[in-house]
Image (tube, helix red, strand yellow):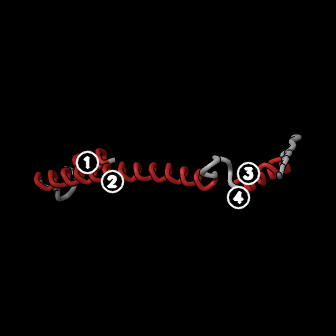
Amino acid sequence: MTVTSMAVILGANHVLAVPFSGRATTTLLISFGVTSVIAFAFIDRAKSCYERMSTTIIRLNELADKDALTGLLNPRAYYEAANRMIRLALGATNDRAVCCLVCRS
């Protein structure tokens, strides 16, 4: 995009009623170049931050759903998964069955 903008400025300069001077054109092209480098650095850093944040959110969700000692689902996550499976089985057009066996000692 920046290269296209620079090409348009250089190509359209002779068509203007009062064209840019050589120094003004150079200054404009340098400012476009510097701005594009800064924008690229900012966007690259923002993408990196977003990827780290997404990974952290996934890890936090895993930690919130599992017991730290056993690694099994905690009751809240277990019932959410069970309800999701029941809704899936009830809404399915094909034959599906859900069976749950709870043993208490």
Q: Are marks 1 and 4 in contact (CB under 8 Å)?
A: no
Read off the residue under disc 4.
Answer: 76
Q: Badge 2 local density, few (<14 within 10 Å), some, or many (20+)?
A: few
In this orientation, which residue lies closer to the viewer: 27 or 59? 59
In this orientation, which residue lies closer to the viewer: 39 or 7? 39
Marks 2/1: CA distance?
21 Å
Read off the residue under disc 1.
Answer: 6
Residue 9 relative to residue 93: left or right: left
Residue 81 numbered tag: 3
- Amino acid carrying label 2: it is Phe
Of label 3 and label 2, which has the lower sequence position? Answer: 2
Quarter holding residue 4: top left
Q: Is residue 18 above or below residue 51?
A: below
Q: Badge 1 local density, few (<14 within 10 Å), some, or many (20+)?
A: some
Marks 1/4: CA distance?
58 Å
Local SS, label 1: helix
Residue 42 numbered tag: 2
Q: Nearer the viewer, mark 2 or mark 4?
A: 4
Marks 1/3: CA distance?
55 Å
Of label 1 and label 3, which has the lower sequence position? Answer: 1
